[in-house]
Amino acid sequence: MTPALEKLALHFASLPAIGRKSAVRLAYHVLEMNEEEVRAFAESLLEVKRATRLCSVCQCFSETEVCRFCEDPERDGGVIMCVEDNRALEAIEALHEYRGRYHVLHGVLSPMDGIGPEQLKIKELLSRLDGTVREVIIATNPSVEGEATAMYLGKLLKPLGVRVTRLAYGLPVGGTLEYADNTTLLRAIEGRTEV
Amino acid sequence: MTPALEKLALHFASLPAIGRKSAVRLAYHVLEMNEEEVRAFAESLLEVKRATRLCSVCQCFSETEVCRFCEDPERDGGVIMCVEDNRALEAIEALHEYRGRYHVLHGVLSPMDGIGPEQLKIKELLSRLDGTVREVIIATNPSVEGEATAMYLGKLLKPLGVRVTRLAYGLPVGGTLEYADNTTLLRAIEGRTEV
């Protein structure tokens, strides 16, 4: 490979879930793109860093000081759903069902990686609990760290007189008991509801 | 997603083997990279287009007028291995066994996609057959198009008094008969050798 191709392949390989072989393939693909497309791609990389900031209220990625969710008067400011990152926010938003507001933590507690409460947007969450917030829905991922973060937030927020809830664990719709893992099955039994 | 993120995700999604979900993930990853890294990545994209040309002899990607394979006096100029693209060349080169020269076709015959002999670097190959070339090894991929291209080149080159060979088909080393596909097994029987 030429030095320029090798360098570009290294850049691609440094991205998540792109291995060496894919990175080489992508570098060659760029070589086959027309110059205008490559220029637009390069510009877009720089633009994303330049244009994006955190919403000063909910901390989601935004191009404005306050994001469209926080500015939307139609949304219920009394409910805040707390997510790990913007991708989780988008997954919820794609349902077109939730009409409350969000708070993005930008991570989960992970002492092994040196991530404690100070590294997350928790004090920004606390500053939003001005008495108008009735409920905080904790929607961290169903992982060990997500669970620990939910527990931590629960202990922190409940004394402040706000209702703290957590997304339900259980069988994924369309799945079968046979293929559910033990932990999920156990949680589904524990969380069983009246029919 | 913000407009800048959405745009970057579209750029990533236009690359081969990157779907919508991965593209979104990559766009967010770029947001988390430091500015210096992003700038270097963008610069590298532009650089690869700017710095890369085709070797005027073998047509492989090169940053110089004549590539290092064609300039290397240690390599045997009497043998030319004909490959589809630079990636195939690299796979052969990684063996550290082949000491002849190369010729990159930049594709294979594919009438359905409008790719005929004129679209490939075939006349550049012919112009290299100046009497010093003893053998052309056709190393196109073992696909229908690769095979058709090999047939075509064989018919074209043999009358010129040059030996034309093709990489062997057969069982992959370490494989088992049981899992070999029918075509491969058939080719392995046809191409059986004396022990």
Image (cartoon, coloured by chain):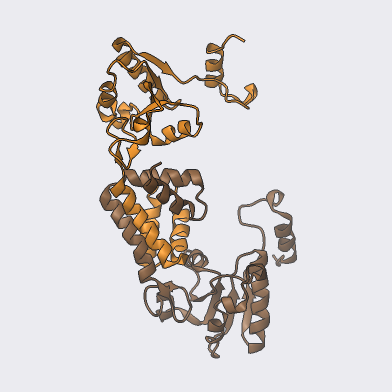
Chain colours: A brown, B orange
Comparing A113 with A147, the one in front is: A113
The residue at the point 75 percent across, 65 percent down is: A190
Comparing A128 with B18, the one in front is: B18
Residue B107 in view here: no
Where residue A29 appears, as percent x and y from the top left, is: 37, 44
Q: Quadrant of the N terminus of chain A?
A: top left
Where residue A113 appears, as percent x and y from the top left, is: 63, 68
The residue at the point 33 percent across, 28 percent down is: B110
Q: Is residue B192 left or right of residue B66?
A: right
Above or below, B178 against A138 in this view is above
Tell me the quarter of the picture where residue A61 sits.
bottom left
Which residue is outermost to the bottom?
A: A131
The residue at the point 29 percent across, 19 percent down is: B129
Q: Is residue B101 left or right of residue A15?
A: left
Where residue A60 appears, as percent x and y from the top left, is: 46, 73
Total numbered badges shown on the rendered structure: 0
Where residue B160 appears, as percent x and y from the top left, is: 29, 12
Above or below, B81 against A32 in this view is above
Residue B44 in view here: yes
Comparing B150 with A134, the one in front is: B150
Q: Is residue B57 left or right of residue A67?
A: left
Q: Quadrant of the C terminus of chain A?
A: bottom right
